[in-house]
Image (cartoon, grey):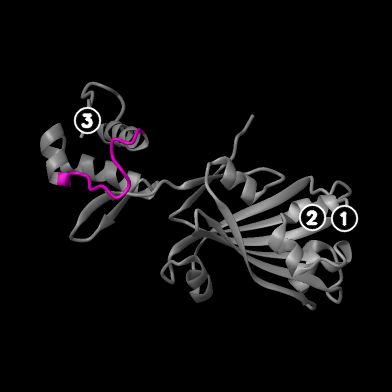
Amino acid sequence: MEHIYLNQQSDVPLYLQLKENLREQIRAGVWQVGERLPSEQALHEQLAVSRATVRQALAELEREGYLSREHGRGTFVSKPKIAMRLSSVYSFTLDIEAKGMQAETRIVLFEYVIRRPEISALLGVSEHEPLIKLVRLRLADQEPIMLETTYLPEQLVPGLSEHDVATNSLYSILEQRYGMQPTSALESFEPILTDEFAAKMLGVPQGAPALYVERLGSLGDGRKVELTQSIVRGDRCRYFVELS
């Protein structure tokens, strides 16, 4: 472990100083993914701070996804979470590839459905109008990251096939084939626990923490073009938005 300097005279709490020091060391590669950190007792003795201070610093790093604790084994450096930017026009593939990772999409389900009153109401179409339901598993470097269920009004995308969405970005299809480009989106977020199906698809235990993200995309004329409901792994992703 590189030297950690804690300023006892600073107004910044010691646990926060320790947390920032450890986080910077993790980001700099001083601590590698899977490497075990010194115990609470060892850090307490080396840094001359209380165990409560050490415990709080480690707990916050664990909450932010930098560390994971294994009962009886210790505290280990976790794989960094993937930062997902919120924007009006979002592409999972472009976002993941921009981070130097390999994006992959697997089609789980492609079907036509009717009589989905709540979905149809959000999309502004009659419940008797057919909808395309598309379920996709999104992966980064072959690791499942999110499970997406997208609904599209069939009248806006006539002839859309499973092969189309398996080989092309949905937004590129909308723009290049149908001349439509979503210009705005309304998104909502809710913490959830994964059900049996989502857990199986994402490769996590049932009841694992996740984030439910609902996105309603609109065209420039106000028509609703897509409703996407995503279940995102809480241990692998975090969202951020840039304000100006």
User: Mark 3 highlights which residue?
Assistant: 2
Give the side of residue 143 with respect to residue 172, left or right: left
| Element type at mark 1 | loop
| Element type at mark 3 | loop
Q: Are marks 2 and 1 in contact (CB under 8 Å)?
A: yes
Q: Can the viewer see residue 43?
A: yes
Give the side of residue 111 with respect to residue 241, left or right: right
Q: Amino acid at mark 3?
A: Glu
User: Residue 167 at x, y = what percent?
Assistant: 70, 60
Quarter of the image that includes the N terminus:
top left
Q: Residue at x 57, y 47 (%)?
A: 96
User: Mark 1 highlights which residue?
Assistant: 178
Dominant secondary structure of the magenta stretch? loop
Instruction: Magenta stretch: give its range.
Output: 28-40
Q: Quadrant of residue 87?
A: top right
The mark tally for this picture is 3
Q: Is residue 243 above or below residue 155?
A: above
Give the side of residue 165 with respect to residue 97, left or right: right
Relative depth, front residue between 53 and 242: 242
